[in-house]
Image: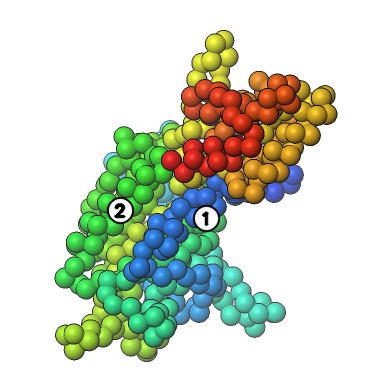
Amino acid sequence: MNKIVSLCKRRGFIFQSSEIYGGLANTWDYGPYGVELKNNLKRAWWKAVVNDRDDIFGMDAAILMHPKVWEASGHISSFKDKYRDCLVCKKRIKSDDPRWNPKKPNWCPECGHDGIGLTDIRDFNLMLKTTLGALEIQGIDTYLRPETAQGMFVNFLNILDSRHPKLPFGLAQIGKAFRNEVTPGNFTFRTREFEQMEIEYFVEPKDADKFHEYWVKERFDWYTGLGLKKENLRKRQHPKDELAHYAKACTDIEYNFPFGWSELEGIANRADFDLRQHEEYSSKELKYFDDAAGEKFYPYIIEPSGGIDRSVLAFLADAYYEEKVKDDLRTVLKLDKNLAPTKVAVLPLLKNRPQIVELARKIAQDLKKCFITVYDDTASIGKLYRRQDEVGTLYCVTVDVQSLEDKQATVRDRDTMKQERVSIDRLKEHLSDKLSN
Ligand code: GAP
């Protein structure tokens, strides 16, 4: 994990937020490579769940919602963590921490002190409160959304009225969510501000189990399709006592992070909880009318809900390799071609030869029209290759003295490090073929 955190900072993937002020704990900023990787991941998800399908509509709902939404959703009454503080080491321990020992109520799993004391169990609502309006005393209290899901439930009627979909159909959105987590940590794994990618898939109640299974498989295959190793993924069904207040069933897709198996995405059967609740609190009927059967009913909802930041972390961890090359160690990110932040780097072999630099720059400008391409001449070729390997660039195109004569450049493959000479006027086609295969 330390190696990944250090690579992220060194190469501009992820930085500590507000670092020049000493940082804000557990808050992170995505740098140039990080934002490309994150955007590629979002694009891949959006394509798979919205653009490639006929039955799911995309949405982008507001982060701020009517305060009643959070009463209806159950977040005000139930979205709480239970924790205790250690009076010795001052650490906060969640009451569902597996190290918790009910037989030793005063033992702290963090510092090992026994007897001095842990505080009583306290309840803590995870929502981040904010005030809307110019004056705090006159403003309306509401919350930053703790999940994107509610923005889709409250638009159920709008979608029925504007798109007239037939069951099964879904809504999908990507967006920020905020939770005042009691124990944030593990880099970007658990933070107070994060991004979710969520689908709310409306089905006939009798089909709910079938579609729950279908979505667990779809989502598992999406991760492996983008390169996550099967052996680093597993499915875990929630036991009854672990289910969220809205869920009838839930299966997590877990990833074997460097700190252990942890949730990447949850696929829940939310039954008709949300539509019934919002109908009660808004007094707007939220049933679906089935023309063929001539009846109204509440559809059930299957919800695949994943975290973008957690996914970025999993893809980084999975792609991270250290390989021995002669007497050297190369670090390489073997990210899938759809996710790699940069597809091509153009590197002049000699930066003090103006003709080589000019030709390399011209090639880079030309390739930019088709692929995310960078130009770099700030180090020796060995260092430039290592730098591109570390950020997962798929192909390096090197321009040398010979290129001036034979009009060819060397194309080096990130994973195999094999090199081949390719005619400069065929470079676009050559790289296009490789990237589309
Ligand atoms: N609408 C259902 C829902 O929000 P969740 O299991 O609480 O379910 C879904 O969250 C996903 O959001 C998780 O699987 C995880 O990937 C991501 N997530 C949740 N809390 C997070 C946090 N504090 N930091 C980063 N990602 C988080």
Q: Which residue is mark 1?
A: 194
Is residue 119 found left or right of 144 in the rendered image? left
Q: Residue furthest top?
A: 327
Which amino acid, mark 1? Phe
Disc 2 residue type (three-letter): Glu
**Is residue 168 depicted above or below 94 in this figure?**
below
Q: Which residue is drawn at the image coordinates 55% and 56% (left, top)?
A: 193
Horizontal and vertical percent for residue 127?
49, 64
* Residue 270 on image: x %, y %: 29, 67
Q: Position of residue 181 (x, y in %)?
A: 49, 54
- Relative height, residue 257 to residue 176 (above, below): above
For residue 2, side relative to residue 290 (left or right): right
Instruction: Look at 32% across and 71% down and name the residue there.
Output: 169
Q: Is residue 103 above or below residue 3?
A: below
**Lower sequence index among marks 1 and 2:** 1
Q: Name the residue nearer the viewer: 387 or 208.
A: 387
Mark 2, Cα crowd under 10 Å, few <14 / some 14-19 / many 20+, is some
Residue shown at 37% from the left, 88% from the top: 284
Which one is in front, 71 or 290? 290
Question: Quick one: quadrant of the C terminus?
Answer: top left
Q: Which residue is mark 2?
A: 218
- For the question of whether residue 128 can be seen, the reply is yes
Circle 1 residues within 10 Å: few <14, some 14–19, many ≥20 = many
Q: From the viewer's perspective, is the residue at label 1 or at label 2 nearer?
A: 2
Please name the residue shown 52% across and 50% down the image: 40
Q: Are marks 1 and 2 in contact (CB under 8 Å)?
A: no
